[in-house]
Structures are given as C-alpha cells and as structure tokens.
Image (spheres, rainbow, N blue to C red):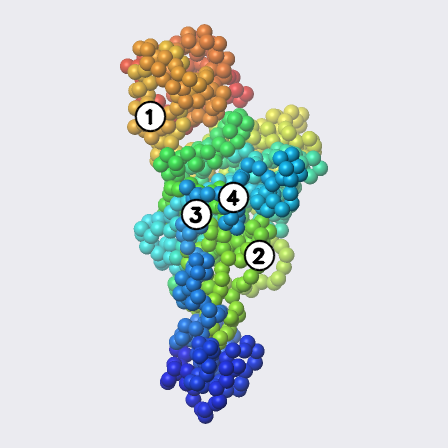
Amino acid sequence: MARKSPAPTKRGATSGPAVLPSSGAFASTVSGPSQLPDVAGVDLSVQEMAEQRHALERTAGAMPFNENKAGEHGLANGHAPQAGAHVELTDDTAGASTLSETISSLKVGESQPMLGRNANSPSLDAVRVDASGQTLTTNQGVLVADNQNSLKAGLRGATLMEDFILREKLTHFDHERIPERVVHARGSAAHGYFECIESLADITRAELFAEPGKRTPVFVRFSTVAGERGSADTVRDTRGFATKFYTDDGNWDLVGNNIPVFFIQDAMKFPDLVHAVKPEPHHGMPQASSAHDTFWDFISLMPESIHHTLWVMSDRGIPRSYRTMQGFGVHTFRFVNARNESVFVKFHWLPAAGTHSLVWDEAAKIAGADPDFHRRDLWESIESGLFPEYELAIQVFTEEEADQFSFDVLDATKIVPEELVPLRVVGRMVLNRNPDNFFAETEQVAFCTAHVVPGIEFTNDPLLQGRIHSYIDTQISRLGGANFHEIPINASLTEVHNNQRDGMHRKAIHRGRAAYEPNSLAGGCPFQAGPAGFVSFPQPVFEDKVRGKPEKFADHYSQAQLFWRSQSLIEKNHIIAAFRFELSRVTVGAVRRRMVSVLANVDAELAQAVATGLGFSDMPAPQPRALAREVKSEVDASPALSLFARPGEMGAAGRRVAVLIADGLDLKALLSVKQAFNDAGIIPRWVGARLGKVTSTDGQQVEVETTLEAMPSVLWDATVVLAPHPQVSSSGGMGQFAEFLRDQYRHCKPILLVDWAPVQMADLGIMTTLPNGEEDPGLFLAAGADALPMPEFVEALARHRHFERESDPPKV
C-alpha cells in the first residue's frame, strides 16, 4: 500500500509553536531536539540541510507503525503475501545519502539522482573496452612511456623497487587466474535469443512464455563435466547445456545436460560421485576420463547409476558438436500460472542440425589433433553465419498423472518416455554472437539452479534441492564473494533493488541511509512486491521428517532396460565397445566382475558381450536387486532414445569437407565441387601435402589452404579426392595420404574420388563394396568433372555416417 508523505503547507514550515531557529539542530549527525526548529530564519549555510531534515521527518512520520505486521501471520499471507507498506516521497532529498550529490565531475557523473533506478543492470555495451588509437596506461590511467624495460640502477644495474609500473603489471599477471569450476570447468559459450512460438499463459505466469514472438536474450554455456579447464573437448563424458535467460522478470537459469538423467538420486552423493570420477588422488591420473578404478568401483556399487552410465557409454557421450547435441533440464520442475495452479514440466532442447556423434577411435584422435574441436566448431559456425539453432520442447503432466507412472518423477535417474507424455515445442533458440572476451563472459558466467522467475518453480527432487544450494555456494568461492551477480555477464536486465550491501568487489553505489526493511526513513522502500512477486506454490506436506528414499527410487533397472531396447544394433555395438574399453583400463579384476554383474540385470546379451571382451572365463551372477519385484516399463521401446531418431532439418549445411588436391588436378572438377558445396551451405577447404600452390592440368595454380598434418582426417566430415593417384603415389606422400583416406573410411564418412580406379582403392585397403557385396552408399567414384555425382554426395553427407561399412574390430 502506497501513500504520499504529507507535503508542508509552506516550504520548511511545521505545525506547532514557534521554535528558536538553530543551525546546530540541522548540521549535526548526532542527536537532535524533540521538535525540529522552523526552517525559516536558519543560517543560509544549513538551509538545504534543514529542508532535507524536515522532508525526512515527514516521510518517517507518514509511517507511524508497520501496517503489514498484522497480516504476516497465517496461511492466507503464505498463499498471497501483501505488498509492502511504503510512502511516495514528496521531496527528492529525503532519500539522498548526501546533499552534495548534486556536485558533478567527470568521475561522479552529471549528479542528477536517478530516482528509483539501478544503473548497474545495463547491456554489456557499458563495459566493453576498445583500445583502438589509444595510448598504453597503467591501471590507474597513467600513460606508460616505456613498456619494454624495467627501471634499473644503470643499464646493467639492479631493478628498482620503485618501479610501480613493473610491479603493477606483474602483480596483476600473478592474479589473473581464478579457481576453475569443480565440475564443468571446460566450457564454451555464445550469446543469442529465445523466441516463444506458443503462449503458455494457461500453465505458467513466466513472461518469456507469455506470447508468440516474444524474444528473450540468452547466454548459453556448453561444457564437459569431469575434465579440468585445459582438457580436451572430445573425451567421453556427460556434457553441460546451461542457458541463462535474461527475462523481464529477472534471470532464469536452466542448468541442464545433454543426457536427460543423472548418475545419482540425492545430492548427498554428489561429492562422492565427483571424487570417484576425478583423477585418482594418489597420482592425479587419468585426466578427463572415467576409465579408471575409482569411478567404476563407485558405479558398480551404485546400481541407480546404470541408466545414466548406459547413456554416457552410448554415442551421446561423444557428440559430433554442440550444434548436434540435445539438451535436457534433467529434473522435473513446476509451472505455476496466474491462478496459482500447478503442473509438472520437463525441458528438452532439440538441435535443428539433428543429433550426431563421433565414433570412439575418431574422438580419441581428435583429442590429440585439436583439443578445442567443439569450441572451434561453435565459434566458426557463428562467425560464418551458420547460427546454431534449437527448439525448446516441454513435457507437461499433472501430479495425479505422475502418481500413476511406474517410476517416480522426482527421481533424477528416470525419464518420462515421450510415448507417455509427448513433446510440445514451445519456442526456439538461436545462438548468433560469440563472446567478446572468453574470461569476462564464458569463464565468469555463473549458472545457478536457484535462479528461477515467477511461474517456474522447483519440485522435491532431492538432487535438485541440493543443487539449489551448491551452485550458488561454488560461485561465491570461485568468483570472489557474494557480489558475483554484479559481474556484467551475470547481471539481470531487470533492475536490482534490495538491502544486500557490501562484500568483496561491490560495484553498486546505493543512495540513501536505510539498508533494512521495514523502514520509514526511505519511505519503506524497497518494499515487498506481494502477489506480483515470486510466491512459492503451496504444496501440502504431510509426512515425517526422515532421511530415506521412496520405494519407487529402488527400481534401478527398468529404464536402463528401456534405453537398451531402444537402441539400434549399431548403437548397441558402440555401447558394448565403450564398456569394454573403459573396463579394460580398470586394474582391479573384482571391480570389472562387479560391473558386469550390474549389466546382467540390464540385458544378458549386453553383459555377455562385455564379459567376452574382457576375457572372462565365466559369467558373474546378476547383482542382487534393491527391489525384489521387477518393474515393467509402460513402454517396450522408445525410438526417441536413439540418436538416429533426430537426423535434423538442415541437411548437410555446416559440414566440413576436405578437398584433397595435388599437381595435375582437374580445375573444372574443383570449381564444380566448390559450387555444389556453396549451394548446400557446406564449407570446403583445399588440403594438400604441403602449403603452397599446386598446378592444374590446364596450367592454373590453386593455393593449398591447409595440410594433411595440420588438419588430419578426423577433423573433417567428408572428403573429396581431386589429387590424381599417380601424382600422389610418385610424390612420396602416399603414406600420409593413405592414412587420411583410411581414417575417413574407418570412421564411416562419405568419400568421393575423381579419376580413381577401384584397384587403386584396394591398394589402400579400402573396398568399394560392403562385406555383404552391396554397393557402399557413402563411397563414390567419378570418371572426370562431367560425371561428378554431387547431389548424391551431398545427400550422403547429410546422413553424416555410413555405418554399413563398420566392423569390430575394424578391417581398415
């Protein structure tokens, strides 16, 4: 409730008997008379102070008691809090920190108080720096005359301690690094926008979903989980997919992963999980890898982890790029509408480019050839205008519907199959701008699951509940204190007004003297919003305070079995190979056998295949289950759980193709290839044995853009070979060239060879037909420039891989 403070009948006058004016009554910051003297007649030196004091007295007097106090009690207030009592100030000086605020300078600004404003929530333009045409200075703005030499006592003398320029430069350098994230340390990010395509006002009051066409700025960070900041992008791991929405109601952070479930059910186990997967503490190995004893010892004793483990051992654990990676909110959240009605919701990001992966041999080689593979792909895609795009889909269901499921929706190791609750696409996200500065934006951005807005709320998921605390806690440690929200990339677009003060690196300069609520000295401001603010959904609570899990949490295998049944044969073979690789690096045989006993509860053939690959002479018995009865999933198989279910809608656009060239190439063929690729949005590069020029058959010269050794086969999605076989063979580069082509073939990528004969391919160990005798759909031979099958090759490239030629072990 807002009232105006009473205005004086005459400026400076108060009611009551006249009081002898006194300058000291207004100039002092300690004590004062029982009744303020009239402003009239006071010394001119304190005239403004007297007017401010009277204004403050009127403001405070307008709130004789706390009108909200009586209504703070009982359920009615809990369901619908009242707006805070406050007074509309009739004199600007009543809220001033100092009367000298009107003194201006280049530093303090124009000194016109911005009433009711917080200028600390601007766009990033306010903090961007460009030194074009500027002279070098110290951090204090002093021009630096010499940035090459320290100050010495003579040309060969000792460096002097008085060299403040050297000391400032070294001190800042020594403190440039901040603690990396405990998990998700390795990341890459981009700016963009989210556009709502369907109003969700019937189920949520969140304004970003209020109307079609509504755009909300976003900042998205992708990451690995286990590795350190300098680790490789292509390790087998869960990937983080965190989105910060800068909404009109404040920041909402959807902090998810590329896998819809997690290893554990309760945040109590999160430190144990991370300690297990991190490098082993006695020797600090391995880096960014789960293929070691402590991880599998932990997982084999935590059967609830098997569902997520199957996902990460699948091709989901080695995505082709962030552009071809799904994202999930993991937890079940609540939507709450304006009528305080609630439904459950789960969030899904669907990439427009489809879901595609690497193969393990390729991922391992990329880690050596280009550890920044995913970061580079994201950056180059945005720079070239091929903006990554994702649909946001939701699953919405009621609490009553959730109670009927065979699983508990509060269990983060479970999904809600799409066959039970179909996806509903409600918006799209486009990433269209790279950060200006990696540290200031990507490294300093702070995502917290606790950052929600009205209309989006938590459920009682015990893992989510722990994350609400943990994410804020870690940012305080990592970013130097409680004011990390003032770092520009973290600042909301909505203005921040509260009574939080001080702390390390405080940026906001608050006007006024009241830093508490309720108050009367600032007219009760800032005051609580009441129903317009965040009001938690009033979920009834009837149970005892206990440490424990619901019975449905004890079902550890039904959804792991569903995931396995939903995989294609190719994907199943990759999962088996991944378990075989990981467990073969474990040194303790008992841990291997225990893990196979867990797999035996998922699928007998899976367990047998892994056991055979590990050289077991006998099969371990299935591990005893926590739940005696077997739970049968409502769904026998869910096609959406296969990567192949979402090939994407962008065709071959954005794929990287190596065009191998050498002396004697056909320039007409090169130009035809270039035109076809340009039309399809494909990015070709001319690759040769060495940098320099090659000469075509008609004497034209073509510049080699990169080399076989600088960008080996694993960095390309496909290859076109325009280098003539005789030239490659006679130049001495056949070994390197053959290795390039073999990896392309082994990794099931499309290959087009111009003027090459099948026998020349056979010399490389590459067959033109599949093992069953059929034609290889990803291998093309063309007799000259006039016979190029470019439409067919582009179509084959859009398929990404041609796994028909794959074998285990590989024949090439």
Q: Nearer the viewer, mark 4 or mark 3?
A: 4
Type of residue at label 2? Met
Q: Quadrant of the N terminus?
A: bottom left
Q: Residues within 10 Å of mark 4 (few under 14, many from 20)?
A: few
Mark 2–mark 1 CB contact (< 8 Å)? no
Type of residue at label 3? Arg
Task: Tell me, for residue 677, which label it has, or none.
Answer: 1
Question: Residue 392, image x and y in percent?
Answer: 39, 46
Q: Which residue bears the numbered disc 3?
A: 128
Disc nearer the start of the sequence (1/4): 4
In this view, the residue in front, 567 or 46, is 46
Q: Which residue bears the numbered disc 4?
A: 144
Question: Residue 345, image x and y in percent?
Answer: 44, 52
Type of residue at label 4? Val
Q: CA distance from mark 4 to mark 2?
A: 29 Å
Mark 4–mark 2 CB contact (< 8 Å)? no
Type of residue at label 1? Phe
Q: Which residue bears the numbered disc 2?
A: 504
Q: Secondary structure at mark 1?
A: helix
Q: Residues within 10 Å of mark 2 (few under 14, many from 20)?
A: few
Q: CA distance from mark 2 to mark 1?
A: 54 Å
